[in-house]
């Protein structure tokens, strides 16, 4: 019961800020010291990596699944 009350309090008083998928990806890359070339296994080509990181291309469902596995985070972070 205490857990439920604490979660409700935190949700009301300390809401999580909504961060966009691109900002989240950049943050995760920065935290792990990754560069664009390190993301080729997820996106396939340097041009797609560049387009995604520059906001010219949206993440696909497949990209999101791979990112989730790569960074060990929920897919929800990228929606």
Image (cartoon, rainbow, N blue to C red):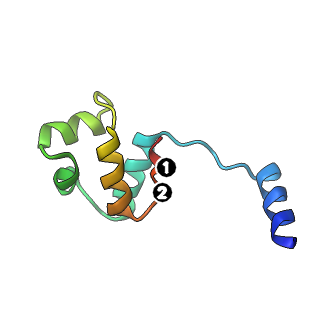
How far apart in space, not on screen, are marks 2 and 1 (Cα)?
Answer: 6 Å
- Extreme residue toward the bottom, this view: 2
- Compared to residue 76, the image places residue 59 above or below, namely above
- Callout 1: 10 Å neighbours few (<14), some, many (20+)? some
Q: Name the residue under label 1.
A: 77
Q: Give the residue at x 16% y 51%.
A: 40
| Image location (x, y in percent) of residue 56 | 28, 27
Q: Mark 2 points at which residue?
A: 74
Q: Give the residue at x 17% y 55%.
A: 41
- Extreme residue toward the top, this view: 56
In the image, taking residue 22 as reference, residue 16 lies left or right, namely right
Between 62 and 40, the residue placed more toward the observer is 62
Between 10 and 5, the residue placed more toward the observer is 5
- Image quarter for residue 10? bottom right
Q: Give the residue at x 34% y 56%.
A: 29
The kind of secondary structure element at disc 2 is loop
Between 6 and 37, the residue placed more toward the observer is 6
């Amino acid at each position: 019961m205490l857990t439920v009350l604490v979660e409700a309090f935190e949700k009301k008083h300390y809401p999580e800020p909504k961060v966009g998928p691109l900002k989240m990806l950049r943050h995760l890359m920065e935290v792990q010291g990754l560069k664009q070339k390190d993301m080729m296994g997820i996106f396939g080509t340097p041009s797609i990596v560049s387009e995604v990181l520059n906001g010219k291309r949206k993440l696909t469902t497949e990209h999101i699944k791979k990112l989730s596995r790569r960074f060990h985070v929920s897919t929800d972070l990228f929606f």
